[in-house]
Image (tube, rainbow, N blue to C red):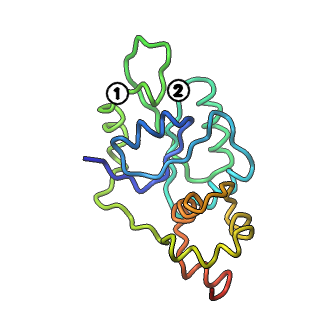
Amino acid sequence: MKYILNALVIVEGENDKSYLKSFLDCDIFVTHGTDINEEDFLYLTEVSKVRKIILLLDPDDVGRSLSNQIQKKVPNCEDVLLYYPSDNKKHGVFECPKDIVIKTLEPYFDNNRERPSLTIEELRPYLTHKKEILSDYHIRVKNNRNILNKLCILKISEKDLKLKYGNQ
């Protein structure tokens, strides 16, 4: 069984993402350490207007610095720290036992997963405006599936695209 989180979870690395996806049904934004730029901040600010954002970063200097940086620039973020005993030198999200992650995130679980606001078939006609979509919504990815995912996180619907870019 996967636990449903309708929030956007921000993590530092791909290992964190893969680990969480093994037992959580949620959207995840990966910072790749400190590789977060102004366009990412603009995107996350837009997301914060329509979704809760949970910062699930490592409790080390890099994670704490990143958390402070994001919280200063992106409103409505909630910093969630994972506390667990460990003999391991690494003390991050990927190393945290699953039961501790679940218990820590339990207050944020939802009963139902929100349906995606847009399908690839609905997006396809608007890809003639791909450059504008990437710019308007502060999206850095180029792959159509990833663009779709980023738009769904923002809760953008076909109706929204139609209003912005006209009938296709």
Would residue 74 be found to the left or right of residue 98 on screen?
A: right
Q: Is residue 5 left or right of residue 160?
A: left
Is residue 33 placed above or below 75 in the rendered structure?
above
Check residue 133 in the rendering and tell me which mark sits there, or answer none: none
**Helix or strand or loop: what does disc 2 sit on?**
loop
Residue 45 position (above or below residue 95): below
- Within 10 Å of disc 2 (Cα), the crowding (few <14, some 14-19, many 20+) is some
Which quadrant of the rendered structure holds the C terminus?
Answer: bottom right
Residue at screen point 35% across, 61% down: 113
Give residue 109's position: percent from left, percent from top: 33, 51
- Label 1 or label 2, whichever lies nearer to me, is 1
Location of residue 7 in the rendering, given as x and y in whole percent from the top left corner: 45, 54
Label located before the other in sequence (1 or 2)? 2
Q: Pointer 1: what residue? A: 97
Residue drawn at (59%, 30%) of the image = 63
Q: Which residue is mark 2?
A: 59
Report the residue that reaches farthest toward the top: 87
Q: Nearer the viewer, residue 125 or 166?
A: 125
Q: Residue at x 57, y 23 (%)?
A: 60
Image side of residue 7 versus residue 22, left or right = right
Residue with the most extreme bottom position:
167
Whole-percent x and y of residue 137? 67, 65
Q: Check disc 2 and give the amino acid type.
A: Pro
For label 1, count other residues whose C-alpha is less than 10 Å away and answer few (under 14), some (14-19) or many (20+). few
**What x and y, as percent, mark residue 59?**
53, 26
Q: Identify which residue is drawn at 67% across, 81% down.
A: 164
Secondary structure category for the residue under label 1: loop
Tell me if residue 66 comes above or below residue 114 in the rendering: above
The amino acid marked with disc number 1 is: Pro
